């Protein structure tokens, strides 16, 4: 990635202390694309009780359904001596369509943290950051091949970094012969109950030659607040996971919206890749359990008890055909197990993607996805297809294609 580097040196600090070297790097991604979907809801219910819609939709967005969403950020580092460095990162998400802020209107909603890199002892940071799944497992999954259409239903495992974690303490180790590990802990911030909204996560990865493997676990107490409710526009009492829609509005995240009353969400993910020449073969598995359903009775519209489980198995192939052209394909199968005696939802999705590099910084790309849903979703309704961050389909099937341009700086 080509970066614009502002470097400056401080000849001496106040009170005559020793000199230090500092640098700040400005970086970003600007993406614009047109996305076509063959079927989108206009309302979640009708007189027949079925979703309304079915119309074709074409829309311009800022990469939210393309290869990567638009962002800009600042990274800073200061040498404190003895191999110790102060570090920080601020990252803003935005729309190229209208300049609006992403992540619910947060100025630095993608990331905002500061910390210390202690050389071989690793890096300690404080702030708004990603969890261990994002740090270790995600890099083996998506890359620059399929984009945001390929996320697992509603990104329930957060492997596409939909949700940031506030108030975190994070540790990442250095690499020891290809082995890295780390952990994240978020303070709940609820007076009188230390664990009410706490979040913790841990993970590790190993890269050796052509083989790479990573695993992670996340545990969110009261996930409606600690995981899904971390943006400025989140509700203190309402459902932050999704919506059942209405006779005038479409559903949102129907795969998991009905599980907002859970006491705890726990997700385990693992991924592995093998590189052979220009090809990368990949496999992954993730499992999420929404435990203690009904803990928040006001959000338990389906009167659930016990636990609900979603798991996805994935297989993928990525290939660098020429120095300028790459393509990839993947298949995901998601199984939603029954809760309180009800059948769960199943989602089968096939993804394709290709990109052509005009330069080291600029790509033209096209991605596509087909999803078929069956069974009963979290809202107790016949499952409908819902690809990426698009409006759900009115039926069990949905096709989407996105084409655009991505520029790095």
Image (tube, rainbow, N blue to C red):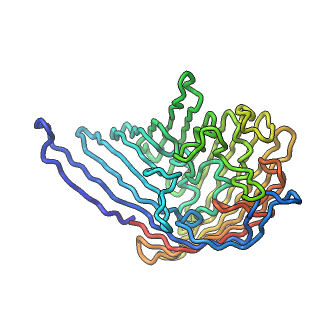
The vertical placement of 200 against 5, above or below, is above
Residue 399 image-quadrant placement: bottom right
Q: Is residue 261 or residue 168 the one in the foreground?
A: 261
**Which residue ends up furthest to the top in the rendered image?**
192
Q: Is residue 216 or residue 190 the one in the foreground?
A: 190
Residue 402 visible, this angle: no
Q: Position of residue 311 (x, y in %)?
A: 72, 48
Q: Position of residue 245 (x, y in %)?
A: 74, 54
Q: Is residue 32 or residue 297 the one in the foreground?
A: 297
**Which residue ends up furthest to the left in the rendered image?**
16
Residue 9 visible, this angle: yes
Residue 27 as seen in the image, left or right of residue 194: left
Tell me the quarter of the image containing the N terminus: bottom left
The vertical placement of 298 against 228, above or below, is above
- Residue name at image x 64 percent, y 57 percent: 151
Tell me the quarter of the image containing the C terminus: bottom left
- Residue name at image x 76 percent, y 40 percent: 308
Residue 144 as seen in the image, left or right of residue 154: left
Q: Position of residue 160 (x, y in %)?
A: 58, 54
**Which residue ends up furthest to the right in the rendered image?**
48
Q: Is residue 143 or residue 76 the one in the foreground?
A: 76
- Residue name at image x 63 percent, y 47 percent: 157
- Residue name at image x 65 percent, y 55 percent: 283
The vertical placement of 210 against 115, above or below, is below
């Amino acid at each position: 990635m080509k970066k614009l580097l502002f470097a400056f040196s401080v000849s001496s600090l106040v009170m005559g202390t020793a000199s230090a070297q500092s640098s700040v790097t400005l970086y970003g991604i600007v993406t614009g694309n047109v996305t076509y979907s063959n079927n989108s809801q206009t309302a979640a219910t009708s007189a027949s009780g079925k979703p309304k819609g079915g119309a074709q939709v074409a829309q311009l967005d800022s990469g939210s359904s393309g290869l990567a969403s638009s962002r800009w950020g600042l990274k800073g580092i200061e040498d404190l001596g003895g191999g110790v460095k102060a570090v920080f990162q601020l990252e803003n998400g935005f729309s190229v369509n209208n300049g609006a802020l992403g992540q619910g209107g947060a100025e630095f909603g993608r990331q905002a943290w500061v910390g210390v890199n202690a050389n071989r002892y690793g890096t300690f940071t404080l702030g708004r950051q990603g969890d261990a799944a994002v740090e270790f497992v995600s890099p083996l999954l998506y890359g620059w091949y399929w984009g945001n259409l390929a996320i697992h239903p509603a990104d329930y495992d957060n492997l596409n970094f939909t949700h940031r974690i506030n108030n975190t303490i994070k540790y990442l180790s250095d690499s020891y012969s290809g082995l890295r590990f780390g952990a994240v802990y978020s303070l709940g911030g609820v007076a009188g109950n230390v664990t009410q909204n706490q979040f913790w996560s841990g993970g590790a990865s190993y890269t050796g030659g052509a083989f790479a493997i990573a695993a992670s676990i996340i545990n969110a107490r009261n996930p409606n607040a600690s995981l899904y409710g971390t943006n400025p526009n989140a509700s203190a009492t309402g459902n932050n996971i999704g919506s059942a829609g209405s006779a005038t509005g479409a559903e949102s995240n129907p795969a998991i919206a009905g599980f907002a009353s859970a006491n705890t969400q726990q997700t385990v993910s693992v991924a592995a890749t093998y590189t052979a020449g220009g090809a990368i073969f990949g496999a992954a598995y993730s499992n999420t359990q929404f435990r203690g359903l009904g803990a928040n009775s006001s959000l338990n519209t389906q009167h659930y008890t016990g636990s609900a489980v979603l798991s996805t198995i994935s297989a993928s192939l990525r290939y660098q055909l020429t120095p300028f052209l790459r393509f990839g394909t993947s298949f995901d199968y998601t199984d939603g197990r029954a809760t309180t005696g009800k059948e769960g939802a199943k989602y089968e999705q096939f993804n394709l993607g290709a990109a052509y590099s005009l330069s080291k910084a600029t790509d033209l790309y096209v991605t596509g996805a087909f999803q078929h849903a069956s069974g009963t979703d979290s809202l107790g309704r016949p499952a409908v297809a819902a690809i990426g961050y698009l409006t759900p389909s009115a039926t069990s099937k949905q096709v989407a294609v996105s084409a655009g341009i991505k520029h790095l700086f």
